């Protein structure tokens, strides 16, 4: 590889880390489309979540439907089993989304993910859903994290 190519690769890696964009998997966003997931702070992937700290999660999505309400449901998937992951604010309309949600509009859902001291220091997958009026997913995303001491 020539040095210019190498430089470009390093530069784009750096840009990628600064943006804190997280690699995610869509787990069935039937009523919307997710374009971007950001977690802050997260300098490496999977994101290292320190116990006792809180992380900001920003999900940018375009809704396909109209909805008066939106409710977040978060799980931590440990060894294939989803365990409820409590968040302080489950009302999506109080998490950066202006309700009612309109079809074809893009929203940034921004919420906090507090990592409690009593959580085990393990790798797990976070599954984050936002449900509409009819309990269908406006988005459902999954991303890996690592809880550290
Ligand atoms: C969330 O991410 C979107 C897309 O990158 C950005 O436009 C928006 O400003 C972010 N919101 C916050 C509160 O960080």
Image (tube, rainbow, N blue to C red):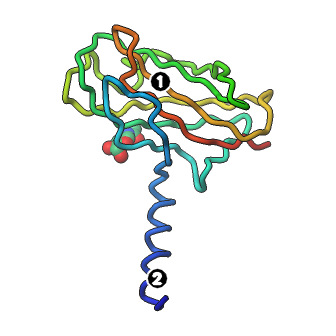
- The reply, left or right, for residue 28 in relation to residue 47 is left
- The reply, left or right, for residue 142 in relation to residue 29 is right
Does 33 sit above or below residue 74?
below
Which of the pair 95/31 is nearer the observer?
A: 31
Quick one: SS at disc 2? Answer: helix
- Residue at (48%, 83%) from the top-left corner? 6
Q: Dot 1: within a 10 Å radius of its alpha carbon, few (fewer than 14), some, or many (20 or more) residues?
A: many
Q: Which residue is mark 2?
A: 7
Residue 7 in percent (x, y) is at 46, 82
Give whichever of discs 1 and 2 has the lower sequence position: 2
- Residue at (61%, 47%) from the top-left corner? 47
Q: Which residue is mark 1?
A: 129
- Residue at (47%, 24%) from the top-left corner? 129
- Residue at (46%, 44%) from the top-left corner? 38
Residue 46 in percent (x, y) is at 62, 49
Rounded to the nearest whole Å, what is the CA distance between mark 1 and mark 2? 38 Å
């Amino acid at each position: 590889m020539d040095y210019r190519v190498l430089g470009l690769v390093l530069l784009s890696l750096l840009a990628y880390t600064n943006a804190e964009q997280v690699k995610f998997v869509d787990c069935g966003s039937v009523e919307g489309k997710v374009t971007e997931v950001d977690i802050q702070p997260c300098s490496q992937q999977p994101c290292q979540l320190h116990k006792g700290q809180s992380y900001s999660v920003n999900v940018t999505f375009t809704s396909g439907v109209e909805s008066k309400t939106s409710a977040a449901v978060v799980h931590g998937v440990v060894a294939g089993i989803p365990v409820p992951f409590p968040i302080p604010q489950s009302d999506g309309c109080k998490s950066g989304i202006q309700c009612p949600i309109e079809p074809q509009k893009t929203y940034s859902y921004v919420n906090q993910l507090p990592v409690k001291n009593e959580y085990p220091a393990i790798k797990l997958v976070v599954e984050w859903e936002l449900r509409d009026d009819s309990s269908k997913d406006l988005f459902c995303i999954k991303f890996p994290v690592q809880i550290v001491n």
